[in-house]
Amino acid sequence: MKSKLWLFSLICIGLFSCNPGDDPIPNPQGELVRDAIYDAMEEWYYWNQDLPVKPTVTDFDSNEEFLEAIKFKPLDRFSYLTTQEAFNNAFVGRNAGHGFGFGFDGEDRLYLTFVFQEAPAGKDGWERGWEIVEINGKPISNYKTNTGAYDFKLGPADPGITNTFTFKLPDGTTTTRSNTKAEYQSNSVLYKNVFDVGEKKVGYWVYNSFKATEGLNPTRSQEVQDSFEYFESQNISDLIIDLRYNGGGSVAVAEQINNYLINSSNGSKLMYTNKLNYLKPNYEKSVNFRKTGGINLNQIVFITSRGTASASELIINSLDPYLDIILVGDKTYGKPVGSFPLSSYFPILKENDVELVPITFATANAQGKAEYFDGFPAEFLVGDSPQFNWGNENDLRLATALQYLQNGTVSGRLMNSYFKPKWEMIDAFTGLRKEFPAF
């Protein structure tokens, strides 16, 4: 299996149905397709020895329901079905929708958390820090469900669908904008800058998802290369990597990032190993670092949250044996396993445009650390503050990272800001789109 096909996908929590987070539904919903799904799981599924006896495929109303019935429930919250086109598009940033994220602050006010530059929202000038007070003429409280989650009823991610939003801007004024969904190319790098912190030059990098630049071979990201060439030109000694909304993506791009981050003294040591099921030992591998560029960091601070998952966690876990790493924000999602798509191995799936993406491998770092299904805890628990735009030092999580790098400690004021969100954006998505969450 070529490494460019390997991916990490997020936990699937079915809080909504028929909403903008639902994956495209593969067709047809037929017996042969379900037979192929089971055959593929028997051969490639990481927990294939825990599969149940094959159920009667006609007892299920959909392929999705069939897959759900055979997954290894104690640990598999990740395997999913989608279409081949949707899968391929996602990993190079070809999207459709408005092109933004949103989240709540500690007072249950809803804000834009990020906006993609070339998306309809970005082209209309939307920015992180705008408070959303109404959607389609209704206050935000109207969209709260009986479970305490939110269903904003924005419709599927199809071009041509229009929604209207009323915002309160940072200067106190309000604006109402109608925005029509369209196809767009998303950017992974949301912000980068360098701060002078005492005698240190500290880079700050907001990275949204591990997406490759289409056409580059080997698989890698031009945005990543440009970012690290910028940081190297600025002679940074420390780096803050903001992954608070990063649900994962391409392992090949994660490896590319790790090769920039690792210090020269460890530049060829073991990055991670993977393990497949008992039928596939020939596909297991060890991946070593291949140091790229001239950055040698003293410390890395990761800004994390429950939206930090899969490839993001692979970065943290792989670097932990070699670098001084601190986590600020909240505990990560918890996904030490990964996937690659199986339609190319099973003609029935390929011919019917069904992309099966089950858990196929687990990873471990150089110290053997592999079991982090509960996520990585943050050393400093700090609440999110989406009311401030990227780079604003009033952002509590950024302020905490900067304070730690300057003093080695964090004030009680910042620590007292912590709150556990009742709802986060990733809760609105399932399957593939949970890995690249955006409205």
Image (cartoon, grey):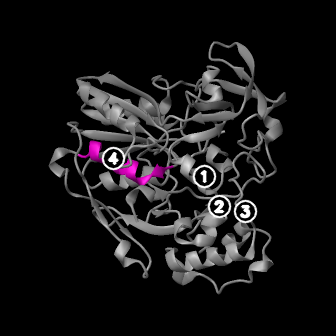
Q: What element carries label 3?
A: loop
Please give the label number shown on residue 27: 3
Label pair 2/3, CB-CB below 8 angstroms = yes
Of 198 and 295, the residue lying toward us: 295
Q: Residue furthest bottom?
A: 53
Residue 411 drawn at (x, y percent): 41, 33
Q: Is residue 369 visible?
A: yes
Q: Residues within 10 Å of mark 3 (few under 14, many from 20)?
A: some
Question: What distance separates the C-alpha of mark 2 from that of mark 3?
Answer: 7 Å
**Label 1 vs label 4, nearer the camera:** 1
N-term-proximal mark, 4 vs 2: 4
Is residue 308 within the magenta segment? no
Q: Which amino acid does label 4 sit on?
A: Gln
Q: Is mark 2 on a helix, strand or loop?
A: loop
Majority secondary structure of the magenta segment?
helix
Question: What distance separates the C-alpha of mark 4 from that of mark 2?
Answer: 30 Å
Q: Name the residue under label 4.
A: 256
Please give the label number shown on residue 353: 2
Q: What residue type is labelled 2?
A: Asp
Question: What distance separates the C-alpha of mark 4 from that of mark 3?
Answer: 35 Å
Q: Is residue 345 above or below residue 397?
A: below
Q: Residue at x 41, y 54 (%)?
A: 251
